[in-house]
Amino acid sequence: MLNEVVPSAFDFGSLALALFAGAIRIGTPFLFVSLGECLTEKAGRVNLGLEGILVCGAMTGYAVSLQTGSPWIGVLGAGISGLVLGAFHGLVCSLRGVNDIAFGIALMVFGTGLAFYLGTPYIQPQAPTLPAFALGDWSTNSQLRNALEINVLFLVGVVLAGLLHWGMASTRWGLVLRLVGDHAETARALGYRLIPVRVTATAAGGFLAAVGGAYLSLYYPGSWNEGLSSGQGLMAVALVIFARWRPWRCLFAALLFGAAGALGPALQSLGITSGYYLFNAAPYVLTLVIMVITCRPDRTISGAPGELSLTR
Amino acid sequence: MSNFNRRKFLITTGAIALTSTLSFELAHAAGKKLIVGFLYVGPRDDFGYNQAHAHAASIIKKMPGIKMFDEEKVPETVAVQKSMEAMIRQDGASLIFPTSFGYFSPHVIKVAKKYPKVRFAHCGGLWTKGKHPMNVGSFFGYIEECQYLNGVVAGYMSKSKKLGFVAAKAIPQVLLNINAFTLGAQSVDPSITTRLIFTGDWSMPVKEAEAANSLIDQGVDVLTCHVDGPKVVVETAEKRGVMTCGYHVSQAKLAPKGYLTGAEWNWVTPYTTIVKAAQEGKPMINFLRGGLKDGFVKMSPYGASVSANAKAKADEIKNKMLAGKYPIFKGPLKDNKGKVIIPAGVIQEQTDIKLESMNYLVAGVMGQV
């Protein structure tokens, strides 16, 4: 028969390009959330609520962009919503006897619920979305052109990762942050106040996570609906462990997770159709593998902040 | 102190007894009105499956003698049982429309056995005599007719002869749509192939966008989908300058350049039939199906870019379907592994119930169940 499909020789170049494009497209929200979580954890707190903050940021960003007509004001609005929720986490966890992980879970449910409740009127309309740099205009290959359409937020994220890396290693506030997260007693003895540092770090972390959410609703896939997050906020926590609390490594970890997310669709479009369940689950499998390899009860993870409730 | 407690107890029980009789009387007073409840799995305005239902429900609401309640975002878990029971006990609903596929078994069946006087009209399930209670019914539309017409238009408009299909899960209704779409396109040009990507769930926006992009990267120039909300797929295709066929409701607004046509539900027709049967006290309609000619499904108006001969051919086939003379699945038909599904000369009628347990992909689909 004419229409019998014969799979041609496997196109590795196409797969590599799809994974490259996916790494950046899908990886950008991972980058922002993991940088935010990295900042928070460096100060000695874990914020599992970033998942809720991400969803809330996605909704706020879309709504603000729709109302004002400017996607950048949308990103800012999302960031502020994340800042508020992050500060909320930071303040509540500063109360005596509040467990940061338990409150993080509560915040995750709260943020998601709030976004769903307030976001209903924004499912249908189309908001202005963020621009991208078309770096591939020289090419005639449409796949390459599309893969090289790099969004502005990704570039901001790369610069931010570098800045945070440098800031944590070589500046005074970086030293204070690490000291508070690593050894609270010493920080206190040196006269630093723990709570303001931790609240600031958590609030800033919330800001970044919400910007990651705004990327989802304002660039890729570029619309607000309730299934938008598929656990990016939670996976970012595993990602930070994988990156050993180094911002620069967060970038590579985010790209790896992005590529894993692109694997399922890319393979299917190239004709590898068996086992798509497994390939579609690649990011989650990756999370599990990382947790199994890095989190053993018999040893502490190198690079982990000493005050973290995960390691204490 | 114990005296006080006893008095309090009496007051409370008295109040409960009073309210229960009152609500009973209220329900009685509203007896002339039929109270109907609708449940959707997602938000009412998702540009997709739930919007199609909610839109039809809003028309039912305006019918005389009807009081309508609806609830959105009810997950396919025990939550739907609670929502249905609340509609029955608090709102006094006597006809319930649980509209999502996954509600049917075990949730609807379980609640229906508990409330034998309430009617349950489920969308998409396969009601079987003897196996399921008599107060339950299922209705569905032969939307594959519209998908076939989508395919015909796509077949005319595609230059690369590669079509793309983003699907959620490999269930019979989805496979029916993929196959009908492909067969429609192949009726125009037998060399046309459909590339298929399963995302794994009904609403996975990031995966849907990634799937659409990968398909376009592989040279696909007409995309369609079977997910709850086609918004992401249609928007991604429009952004990248390829054409789309819609699903569930019209997405023409989202893609003014690339929207060709679309397969839409027209749930008002089955809803009205079932509501009228309940109002007139006729027995529950247990099994209700219909296609284009019954007004259960309809096509979106053609987009501006659709060529005249594509329109002419699609309209010609549509007229045959309206006359009930165009079965889609007929021999010779092979699946994409080369196995003969329908031998030459055999016709599988639209109403054949076996079509609702489809488990193969026709030749020309690049994908696997």
Image (cartoon, rainbow, N blue to C red):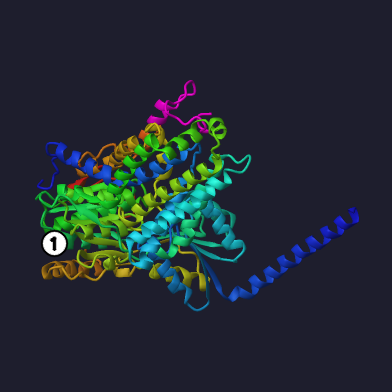
How many discs appear?
1
Q: Is residue B286 above or below residue B192?
A: below
Q: Who is closer to the viewer here, B115 or B264?
A: B264
User: Residue visible at 39% across and 46% down?
Assistant: A230
Residue B215 horizontal/vertical position (percent): 20, 49
Secondary structure beneath dot 1 equals helix
Amino acid beneath label 1: Met
For label 1, the residue is B157
Span shown in magenta: A289-312
Please say whether residue A310 is one of the residues in the magenta stretch: yes
Q: Of A126 and A158, which appears nearest the observer?
A: A158
Where residue B141 sits, quadrant-wise, is bottom left
Look at the image and tell me whether residue B286 can be seen: no
- Quadrant of residue A65 within the rendered picture: bottom left
Position of B269 relative to A188 (above/below): below
Task: Work out whether B89 lies above or below A191.
Answer: below
Q: Tell whether B215 sits left or right of B109.
A: left
Judged from this view, the residue extending furthest toward the top is A298
Q: Position of residue B351 (x, y in %)?
A: 31, 59
Q: Nearer the viewer, residue B356 or A231?
A: A231
Left/right of residue B235 with respect to residue B63 in the rendered view? left
Dot 1 surroundings within 10 Å: few (below 14), some, or many (20 or more)? many
Magenta region, mostly helix, strand or loop? loop
Q: Quadrant of residue A288?
A: top left
Residue B19 visible, this angle: yes
Q: Is residue B147 above or below residue B197?
A: below
Residue at the far bottom in the pictured view: B64
Q: Chain of mark 1?
A: B
Q: Position of residue B81 (x, y in %)?
A: 54, 54
The picture places residue A243, in percent across and down from the top left corner, at 37, 33
